[in-house]
Image: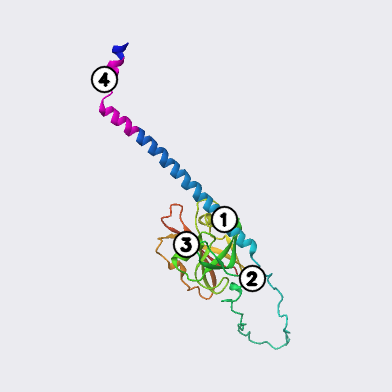
Amino acid sequence: MNQILVTEKLYITPELKRKKKLYKLEFFLSIFLVCVLVSAYIYAEYDRNKSEEVSQEILSDLQIPQEDTTIAKNNVLVVVLSDEPSEPEEEEAVPQPTTSNNSSRTQSKKKTKSGYEYTTIATINIPKINLTYPIVDGTTHTAEETEALLKISPTKFWGPDPNSVGNFCVVGHNYRNSRFFSKVPTLAEGDSIDITDMSGKTITYKIYTKYQVDPTDVSCTTQLTNGRREITLITCTDDSKYRVVVKARQVK
């Protein structure tokens, strides 16, 4: 028996001991890496949940007045009927109150954790994907500010005030779940998007195109809309290699 034990012990060479220690090290290192990855995933999910909560708190705190649908409240419309035919007159453009620094800025300014100030300028509702969020806008419009705002809600990227003539561009994160703009890539031509500005006016837009571009391609933000109201939604593809662009036009 002793002879057998001695014989077996002789086979445990320094090389085997070194490999044994190496295997133990690799095992504990693998366990450590798994713990780090799991912790990172849990923290990221927690951070996304907090972002969702902040966005919904902004939405619940909004004080948007009901849209006034009364026409010609303080004016009298006089129509003169005549048997004589007349040439139709061109429609006269009625001046509208500007929304810049007015209705879009009625909400008080708030701050992100990193200190960037922002205001809520509109809400977006997409019935097909059950999406309702506030749209926020910062003050410095730097890349750092935009990235900070994107963590709490969809953010204005470029263009005029909401529901104004031009191309209102909004960016949002794709978390590959149901939050923020994650489901925007599933939208298709003909789907509707509702934008409500801070004056309470809601305009419905219909999607007319969707495509992908490189991250550096910002041609979708052009303001050449031929005098129409348009919106552009921008988010990442699931692999984050490209940008998904969804463009919609006001329903006539």
**Type of secondary structure dominating the magenta stretch:** helix
Give the CA distance from mark 4 to mark 2: 87 Å
Q: Earlier in the sequence, mark 1 or mark 2?
A: 1
Q: Which label is found at residue 10?
A: 4
Give the secondary structure at mark 1: helix
| Mark in the foreground, 1 or 2 | 1
Kindly identify the amino acid type of the residue bearing the numbered disc 4: Leu
If the image is split into quadrants, where does the N terminus sit? top left
Q: Are marks 4 and 2 in contact (CB under 8 Å)?
A: no
| Mark in the foreground, 3 or 4 | 4
Q: Earlier in the sequence, mark 3 or mark 4?
A: 4
Residue at 28% from the left image edge and 31% from the top image edge = 18
Residue at 56% from the left image edge and 54% from the top image edge = 50
Residue at the farthest front position: 2
Q: Which residue is mark 2?
A: 201
Q: Position of residue 102 (x, y in %)?
A: 60, 76
Give the CA distance from mark 1 to mark 2: 25 Å
Q: Earlier in the sequence, mark 3 or mark 1?
A: 1
Give the secondary structure at mark 3: helix
Q: Which label is found at residue 183?
A: none
Q: Which residue is mark 3?
A: 147
Q: Are marks 3 and 4 in contact (CB under 8 Å)?
A: no
Kindly identify the amino acid type of the residue bearing the numbered disc 1: Glu
Give the CA distance from mark 3 to mark 1: 15 Å
Q: Which residues are magenta?
A: 5-23
Give the secondary structure at mark 4: helix
In front here: 104 or 234?
Answer: 104
Give the CA distance from mark 2 to mark 3: 28 Å
Q: Are marks 2 and 3 in contact (CB under 8 Å)?
A: no
